[in-house]
Amino acid sequence: NPFRIYPEYGYSGPINLVVFHPNSNYLASAHNDHTIHLWNIQNENALVRIFNGHRHQISSLCFSPNGHFLISGCWNGEIILWDIQHNLQIAHLFLHKQAISSIEFSPLTGTLLLISSIDSTISLWNCFMITKIYDEKLTDSMNKNISSHKILLNVFKTKNIPIFHIKFSKENILYAIGLTNE
């Protein structure tokens, strides 16, 4: 049977993105009202939870390889890392100057995070450190001095060409970058 997202759950507007959970039992959908809905597609398409936190339209979604985390990026350059089991924001950061175009966890361990933006940059993040800081219950000081926590590993910049998609290979190597042809 086809999967249907039902309006009786309180939302009937456009759906901008969908992404499957690694175990294929769940699906996350990003909506025009800046929310993300998590659906159990094995249980009559039941709505599991709604994630709120973005102030702008969501432009990218990705589950971690172990399925514990969901990361979302939006048009104003912010990302939110979610603990999907507990419906918690682990990190809420403004990482780029323009829209987040693509987010990708490293496939082997999920400890690296590639984020691309139409601001012509790709940033490589240490996701393990982000979750470790969360576990240690550090506060917003993380957002003020990211480099002191060794979270940002590198930034790659193109010659003012917006980057629209990135992809890791199975060996944790940056595999492909999608650019415009301007």
Image (cartoon, rainbow, N blue to C red):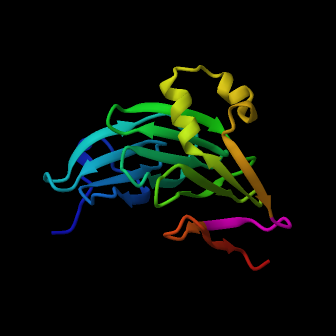
Q: Quadrant of the N terminus?
A: bottom left
The picture places residue 154, in percent across and down from the top left corner, at 74, 51
Judge from the rendering whether residue 71 lies leftward or rightward of residue 11; answer left or right: right
Taking the spot 23% from the left edge, 63% from the top edge, the residue there is 3
Which segment is the magenta one? 158-165
Q: 109 or 114: which is nearer to us?
A: 109
The magenta stretch spans residue 40: no
Judge from the rendering whether residue 48 lies leftward or rightward of residue 32; answer left or right: left
User: Does residue 144 sit above or below 154 in this rendering?
Assistant: above
The magenta stretch spans residue 164: yes
Taking the spot 51% from the left edge, 35% from the top edge, the residue there is 131
The picture places residue 40, in percent across and down from the top left corner, at 22, 50
Query: Residue most toward the bottom?
Result: 181
User: Does residue 134 sit above or below 155 in this rendering?
Assistant: above
Q: Main secondary structure of the magenta part?
A: loop
Counting the numbered discs, the total is 0
